[in-house]
């Protein structure tokens, strides 16, 4: 079976998806992180994740999930703690959560398309829109 050609290049992106405020992790993701860092699942959960709860508005909009912790970043306000901020790459690529493995779930990445357009308009192959 032929693999569909993707229309984005993560190597040319400064890690926009890593700046999403909520990067959800599952129990399986926590176990993967624990094994990667040679910790127990409880230690990995405490060290790398936090609880996110949102219970305003309609009950169908309520959220109760476990997400990755963030750290300050020089391009975006904050990013996933596992983003290597010099190389702009995931420092735990083999142990990354399922949501990261699936992103962007198709042949296109909306941010990469925007970035490519902005770089063309700016005449700068390394331009990063920050505001």
Image (cartoon, rainbow, N blue to C red):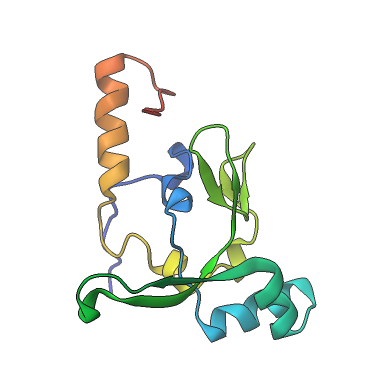
Judge whether 92 appears above or below 85 on screen. Answer: below
Judge whether 73 appears above or below 56 on screen. Answer: above
Q: Quadrant of residue 21?
A: bottom left
Residue extending furthest front?
Answer: 56
Along the horizontal axis of the image, is 2 left or right of 38?
A: left
Image coordinates for residue 112, horizontal then vertical, percent: 32, 41
Q: Quadrant of residue 63?
A: bottom left
Q: Quadrant of the N terminus?
A: bottom left
Could you tell me which residue is drawn at 62 percent across and 40 percent down?
85
Image coordinates for residue 14, horizontal then vertical, percent: 48, 38
Could you tell me which residue is drawn at 39 percent across and 22 percent down?
125
Along the horizontal axis of the image, is 117 left or right of 101?
A: left
Q: Nearer the viewer, residue 69 or 11?
A: 69
Image coordinates for residue 98, horizontal then vertical, percent: 46, 74
Could you tell me which residue is drawn at 30 percent across and 15 percent down?
122
Residue extending furthest right?
Answer: 38
Q: Nearer the viewer, residue 119 or 44?
A: 44
Could you tell me which residue is drawn at 62 percent across and 54 percent down?
81
Image coordinates for residue 71, horizontal then vertical, percent: 61, 48
Q: Quadrant of the C terminus?
A: top left
Residue extending furthest top?
Answer: 123
Count of numbered tags: 0
């Amino acid at each position: 079976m032929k693999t569909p050609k993707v229309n984005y290049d993560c190597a040319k992106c400064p890690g926009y998806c890593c700046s999403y405020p909520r990067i959800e992790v599952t129990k399986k993701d926590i176990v993967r992180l624990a094994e990667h860092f040679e910790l127990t699942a409880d230690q990995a959960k405490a060290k790398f994740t936090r609880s996110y709860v949102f219970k305003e508005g309609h009950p169908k909009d309520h959220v109760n999930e476990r997400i990755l912790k963030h750290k300050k970043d020089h391009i975006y306000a904050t990013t996933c703690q596992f983003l290597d901020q010099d190389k702009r790459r995931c420092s735990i690529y083999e142990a990354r959560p399922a949501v990261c493995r699936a992103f962007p779930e198709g042949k296109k990445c909306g941010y990469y398309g925007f970035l490519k357009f902005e770089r063309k308009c700016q005449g700068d192959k390394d331009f990063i829109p920050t505001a």
